[in-house]
Image (cartoon, rainbow, N blue to C red):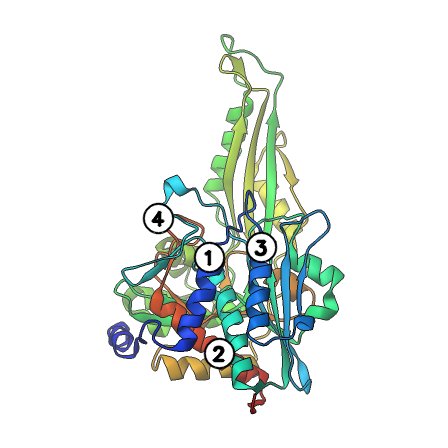
Amino acid sequence: MKFLAHVLAIIVAPAIAQTPEQRELRDIYKELVEINTTDSVGSCTQAAEALKARLKAGGIAESDLQVLVPPGGPKKGNLVARYRGTGAKKPLMLLGHLDVVEAKREDWERDPFKLVEENGYFYGRGASDDKSMVAVFVANLIRYRREGYRPERDLILAATCDEELIPSKFSGIEYLLKNHRSLIDAEFALNEGASGLLDGKGGYVRMGIQAGEKVFQTYQLEATNPGGHSSLPVKENAIYRLAGGLARLGAFDFPFKLTDTTRLYFERMSKIEQGPMAADMAAILRNPPDPQAIARLSSSTAFNNATVRTTCVATMVDAGHATNALPQRARAIVNCRILPGEPVDEVTRTLVRVLADDKIKLTPTHQAVLSPPPPLTREILGPAEKVSAELWPGVPLVPTMSTGATDGRFTNNAGIPTYGLNGMFRDPDGSGVHGLNERIRVRSLYEGHEYLYRVVKLYAGGKSVAP
């Protein structure tokens, strides 16, 4: 299967930026990537205004284009654009985010805020997450307008700020849902959260559609002590106490559990993978599941482990106040990603039990946002599978659960079922998302462009008329 997919990748790989539509997308994408939208020094408002100008020039009425800036956050603007249809059906939201994680120029091989095309890749912060998808949505709305496309649903583009910050004072999607719900209300939404997967040689393995994501919850752990002079050490030490609890947490695994989405994921992946991996994926689906298969699968990749259980991991430590003093305080941050449907309070109780030390104080740093997984109906799966089969014959569409967090946790919680679907393939190492030298294959950007162009039209219905 993988060999065939590799051959198909070579045969059907599109020409690079040969069509007017591809050149238009590249221009939009370049402008967006080169606008710094980090929290520290960047501006989502500048990016939102730039895209608004693009859409206006492309024929979208200015009255249907709004840059909405939350009070107190002048650089935290969000773009809402409405492409009007007949109104026969409730709107479809096209959701993406403008902000990106921090990127230090001295750490990167290339300037992270200059779009660089090199060796078949686009490089830049946000090249994959998530400016590729936002640029595609903008380019396709302009393309629809040029063609005179009249959908049965309004198409609502919501390009938000502060998706990458958790929690965020200026979360764009929270601000829009609370203050401008009527502008973005939709029957369902398409968002980031799932990509296609390439093998190590650039061959297609699978395309993904994401339904549901883990719940994000962070805790502070703290141990305190009167301290004293370091020349007179005692056994009671805040650092040792905290370290002991963290060591117990590091050795602990939350129970194995499958959701409807992850069960379907492993069912389909067991037919794609080969050898022992395929056998283990099938074995965990049995009733009861094979415990040895669970152990092997959990240790095979971090993604497999995170897919089958809640995870809690120490991410930050701060302790002591002087090199020659016993520590009076030791703190750590533990970040949990909780399976959908698993009570947060139950996870809290489990952490207390695993830390096994009543002198380690455990405090949630924020209130978790629950995110019920949306249903994978035929109305959702059908169009996604159809277009996937047209563009990549023989490459299966596989439902996935996101182990990370997206704006979809807010829209799902607000009653707008949200699905991750972008039609773009990533390398097996994750393509540097949130890391150094973030990239996306040039062909993958243009494939996603065509995929979303087609699939949105299937979801929205309607037809093209003379512009």
Nearer the camera: disc 2 or disc 1:
1
Using the image as rendered, state which of residue 208 and residue 308 is in the foreground. 208
Q: Is residue 417 in view from this perspective? A: yes
Q: Position of residue 185 (x, y in %)?
A: 70, 71
Q: Amino acid at mark 2?
A: Tyr
Q: Are marks 3 and 4 in contact (CB under 8 Å)?
A: no
Locate the C terminus by quadrant: bottom right
The numbered mark at residue 110 is 4
Locate the N terminus by quadrant: bottom left
Q: CA distance from mark 2 to mark 1?
A: 21 Å
Q: CA distance from mark 3 to mark 4?
A: 23 Å
Nearer the camera: disc 1 or disc 3:
3
Q: CA distance from mark 1 to mark 3?
A: 12 Å
Q: Amino acid at mark 3?
A: Gln
Q: Position of residue 246 (x, y in %)?
A: 50, 36
What residue did someone put label 3 on?
46
What residue did someone put label 1 on?
33
Q: Is residue 383 left or right of residue 72?
A: left
Q: Amino acid at mark 1?
A: Val
Badge 1 element: helix
Badge 4 element: loop
Count residues near mark 1 (Cα–Cα under 10 Å), then give few for <14, some for 14-19, many for 20+. many
What residue did someone put label 2 on?
453
Q: CA distance from mark 4 to mark 1?
A: 13 Å
The image quarter containing residue 466 is bottom right
Badge 2 element: helix
Q: CA distance from mark 4 to mark 2?
A: 31 Å
Badge 3 element: helix
